Image (cartoon, grey):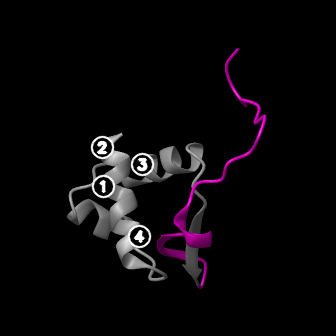
Amino acid sequence: RRRQEAILRVLQDAGDRPISLSELRERGIANPAAMIYELELSGYEIDRVHRHGRLLGVRLARGGEPRVEAGRRRRFGR
């Protein structure tokens, strides 16, 4: 949870500016791609910004608040 809060803070501070995975690593976030995936599982919408087919970075979408869906079904598990 602390690692999620750390990456979330970096993305919130960046605003609309995309943050590259290497920049996240430089800021002490180990395995940033997995952390971004965990944020998405927690309901945060992440934009992936591309230029000429290459990933420039990621940023929070829609104000940076997690989606809350009533009665949301779990996709995996029992």
Q: Which residue is mark 3?
A: 35
Would you say the magenta stretch is mainly helix, strand or loop?
loop
**Which of the marked residues, 2 or 4, is nearer the chain's N terminus?**
2
Q: Which residue is mark 1?
A: 6
**Which of the marked residues, 1 or 4, is nearer the chain's N terminus?**
1
Determine the CA span between mark 3 and mark 2.
11 Å
Determine the CA span between mark 3 and mark 1.
10 Å
Q: Amino acid at mark 2?
A: Arg
Q: Decide whether residue 57 is among the magenta residues.
A: yes
* 10 Å crowding of disc 2: few (<14), some (14-19), many (20+): few
Q: Decide whether residue 77 is among the magenta residues.
A: yes
- Label pair 2/1, CB-CB below 8 angstroms: yes
Q: Label 1: state its secondary structure.
A: helix
**Which of the marked residues, 3 or 4, is nearer the chain's N terminus?**
4
Residue at 62% from the left image edge and 71% from the top image edge: 62
Q: Which residue is mark 4?
A: 12
Q: Which residues are magenta?
A: 52-78
Note whether residue 20 is visible.
no
* 10 Å crowding of disc 1: few (<14), some (14-19), many (20+): some
